[in-house]
């Protein structure tokens, strides 16, 4: 597909350009040279060591993490909207982000998971996300399986429950560290990005995206309802459980390193459907790339608009996503459940 090739080129170019931008601007040619040196173990002259370290040790893992998170949120957003048959659904509708926030804040306050070192909060967030997903799964199950309406309602209800738990933890916390952690996980950021966090996130996002893409035709069938799926031999109950577990794992891995970033998984799937149609096989091929490119540039804005401070990612995605969402709703009303 030509569009996929163009998006891959745009993503590659965006990564190189954005890595070079910031408080210390590095030209794209030098940025590419430093990246090549980092990948191949090449040599750098002594007067370039500082700039090389900024590029390779600080910015590169951050930008790559932004691309992975954007791709993951985009792919999961497409799948969740199909699984629950709700155009307003996003990766966090099932309460995963709230559970992750509880896990991260609880670990920060209690000092738990000390064995994880600097990754304790992220580990706690991932475990909290899995616990939240498990609770939603158990509470939403019925004799009819996991129905879309029960999934959404259960996820929303448990999100409120987790937010109440968060409020209690923060209220009784001995210092403001829990509040700061809560703000990070509720608004998103890549300030803690390191090379060490990339491999597990990359595996979760890449494997999850590939598996979701393989379920593209099944998602097309689910969009028409369980009766239509049954008529052609698709076990919607089993498929919905499989996709629920898969999306929960990917969302948990993403939230654990970036916090909750709003509107990416909600708006981008609709934009891509306008470009390539509603076939999930195509949408799932394009949306992750669009999400990656989008998040790379959003991260650049977050660290440069109010430098040296960072603007939370959720602020920027909301400022972009809300007006786009409203325009889509007015101009393409059928995407949101009718004109």
Image: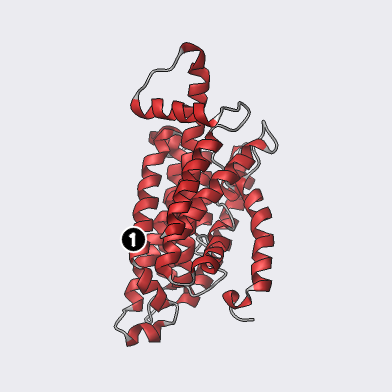
- Can I make out residue 139 in this image? yes
Residue 8 location (% of width, % of height) = 44, 49
- At mark 1, the secondary structure is helix
Q: 19 and 153: which one is in front?
A: 19
Q: 327 and 316: which one is in front?
A: 327
Q: Residue at x 38, y 34 (%)?
A: 115
Q: 304 and 195: which one is in front?
A: 304
- Can I make out residue 128 in this image? no
Q: How is the image coloured?
A: secondary structure
- Vertical side of 240 occupied by 42: above or below: above
Q: Residue at x 44, y 70 (%)?
A: 139
Residue 36 location (% of width, % of height) = 40, 29
- Along the horizontal axis of the image, is 77 left or right of 184? left
Q: Residue at x 66, y 49 (%)?
A: 315
Judged from this view, the residue extending furthest toward the top is 46
Question: In this figure, which residue is indicated by the disc labeled 1?
Answer: 211
């Amino acid at each position: 597909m030509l569009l996929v090739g163009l998006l891959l080129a745009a993503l590659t170019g965006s990564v190189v350009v954005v890595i070079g931008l910031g408080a210390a601007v590095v030209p794209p040619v030098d940025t590419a040279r430093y990246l090549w040196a980092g990948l191949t173990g090449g040599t750098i002259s002594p007067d370039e060591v500082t700039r090389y370290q900024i590029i390779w040790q600080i910015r590169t893992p951050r930008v790559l993490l932004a691309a992975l998170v954007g791709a993951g949120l985009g792919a999961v957003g497409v799948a969740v909207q199909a699984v629950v048959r709700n155009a307003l659904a996003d990766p966090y509708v099932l309460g995963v982000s709230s559970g992750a926030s509880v896990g991260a804040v609880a670990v920060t306050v209690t000092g738990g998971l000390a064995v994880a070192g600097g990754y304790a909060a992220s580990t706690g967030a991932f475990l909290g996300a899995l616990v939240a997903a498990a609770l939603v799964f158990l509470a939403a199950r019925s004799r009819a399986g996991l129905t879309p309406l029960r999934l959404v309602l259960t996820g929303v209800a448990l999100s409120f429950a987790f937010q109440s738990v968060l409020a209690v933890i923060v209220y009784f916390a001995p210092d403001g560290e829990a509040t700061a952690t809560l703000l990070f996980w509720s608004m998103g950021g890549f300030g803690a990005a390191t090379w060490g966090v990339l491999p597990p996130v990359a595996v979760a996002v890449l494997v999850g995206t590939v598996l979701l893409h393989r379920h593209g035709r099944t998602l097309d069938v689910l969009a028409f309802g369980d009766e239509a799926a049954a008529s052609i031999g698709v076990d919607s109950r089993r498929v919905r459980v499989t996709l629920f577990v898969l999306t929960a794992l990917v969302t948990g891995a993403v939230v654990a390193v970036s916090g909750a970033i709003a509107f990416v998984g909600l708006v981008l799937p609709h934009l891509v459907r306008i470009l390539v149609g509603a076939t999930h096989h195509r949408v799932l091929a394009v949306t992750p790339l669009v999400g990656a490119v989008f998040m790379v540039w959003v991260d650049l804005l977050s660290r440069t608009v109010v430098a040296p401070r960072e603007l939370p990612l959720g602020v920027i995605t909301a400022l972009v996503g809300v007006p786009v969402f409203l325009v889509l709703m007015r101009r393409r009303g059928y995407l949101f459940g009718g004109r």
